[in-house]
Amino acid sequence: MLVNFLNRLVPADFRSEVRGPLRRLYLATLVNCFGNGLAFAMFVVYLHNVRGFSTTFSTLLLSASAIVALTVSPVWGTLTDRIGPSKTGLIGYFMSAVGLALWASVHTRAEAIVVALMITMFEGASWGPGTVMMTRLVNESHRQRAYGVNFMMVNVGIGMGLLVSASIVSVRHPHSFTVLYLFDAVVTLIAGGIFSTLFDHGRPVSEATKGDTAKEGWGVVLRDRRLRHYVIASMVLFLGGYGSVDSGLSLFVVNNLRISVHVIGLTFFFNTVTVVLSQLWVLNRLEGRSRTRAMAFVSLLWFLFWAVLGGSLALPAILAVIAMCATQVIFAIGETMLQPAGTAIVNQIAPEHLRGRYNAAAGAVWGISGTLAPAITGLYYVAHLGNWWPIGTGITALVGGALMLRLRSELTPEEDGTVSATLAT
C-alpha cells in the first residue's frame, strides 16, 4: 500500500532520474535558499527600523536594486550560453557571499547603495544557470515535475531560514542583523561549493552542436512573440504577488497592522509548510492540464490573499495573525502551480543553445516587478493610502491572470502542457 501511494505521488520513472547530479543540484538549491530565508523580506525593515533610513529611501533603494537586476539579467543569460551554467553560477554564488558580508555593516546611504546594488548584480546569476543545468539532467517528459520539486527545495530552505531568522533578529538589537547577514554569507559559500561539484554537467553548448544557429542571440529571443507575451503577463502577475510581498508586506505588518516583526517569520512558515506538503500533489494534478489556465487560477488565489490581508485591519491583533497565517496557505498553493508551470513553458519554447537567454528574459520579470512594486508601495504610503495597498495589489494580480489566459491561444498543446512532450514526438 505504501509503495502504491509513493508511486502515485512520485512516479517511479521520475524517481529513477533523481540520482547523483540532480540530487546535488537540489541540495545546492536547498542550502542557498536556507540563506535566502535568513534575510527574507527583511530589506526594508533592516534599512528603516534598524539603520534609521527613511521609508522612501529604503523602498527606492529596493527599486534601484531591482533595476540593476533587470539590467544585468541579459548579461547572465548570455554568459550562461557562452561559458556555461557552471562558471556563471559559481561567479554568482561567490560574489553574493561577499556582498552579504559587506551588507552586515552598512551605516551610511552611500554604503547601503553600493552594497545593495552589488548584491543584486550577482544574486540572480545562479538561478538561471541552475534551471539550464536541470534541463540537461532530466528527461524532457519529467521537466515540469523536476521544476516543481526544485521549487519545493526552495521553500524547504526558505522555511528553515525563516525559523532561524525569527530566533536571531530583533529591531531592538541591531547586532543581531549583523550576525544574520554574516551567517547568510557563509551559507551562500557552502551552496556554491556544492554547485561546483556539477561543473562537468554545466559546460557551454559546443559550436559544433549549434551548427548554423551559432550566431543567433538576443535578436531571436526578443522576436519570439510567445516569450514576449509570457514576460508581460508574468510581470503583472508578479506585481500582484512576489514583488509586492517582498517590498511591502513586512512594512504593512509592522506599521499598519502594528504587529511584531517576528510574526512575519511565523506566517511565512505556514507558507513554506504548505508548499512542501502540497507540491507533489499539485504536480500530479497539473500533469496534462493547461499551464496558462493554472497560472490564471493563481491570480484568483493571490487576490484572495491580499483581500484578507487588507481586511485584517479591522481585526484584533490575534485574529489578524491567524488570518495572515491562513492566507499564506492560499498564497502558497498558488506558488506550487505558478513555478513549475511557468518554468516549463519557457523551457519548452526555448531552443537548447539559447536556453540561458530565454530563462534570463523570463527571469527579468522578477527584476521588473521588483522595480515597480517598491515604487508603487512607496506611492501608496506617501499619499497616506497604505491601508488600501493590499486590495490594489490584489486587483493587479487579477489583471495578470487575464493576460495569462490570452497567452494560451499562442501556445501549442505541447507548450501549454495539455499534450506531453513524449506523445508530441
Image (cartoon, rainbow, N blue to C red):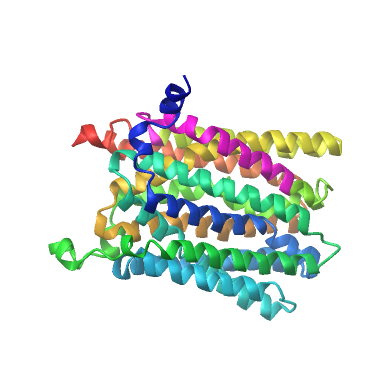
Identify which residue is drawn at 70% across, 72% down. Answer: 104
Identify which residue is drawn at 32% across, 46% down. Answer: 138
Residue 358, percent from left and from top: 34, 56
Figure quadrant of residue 84 = bottom left
Highlighted range, magenta: 265-291
Nearer to me, 221 or 264: 264
Residue 131, percent from left and from top: 39, 54
Q: Quadrant of the C terminus?
A: top left
Q: Does the magenta stretch mainly form a helix, a strand or a loop?
A: helix
| Residue 231 part of the magenta-drawn span | no
| Residue 266 part of the magenta-drawn span | yes
Residue 388 appears in the figure: yes
For the image, the number of numbered tags is: 0
Nearer to me, 355 or 387: 355
Figure quadrant of residue 82 = bottom left
Q: In this rendering, is residue 220 above or below 417? A: below
Nearer to me, 171 or 21: 21
Q: In this rendering, is residue 29 above or below 125? A: above
Residue at the extreme top: 1
Drawn side of residue 378 relative to residue 317, left or right: left
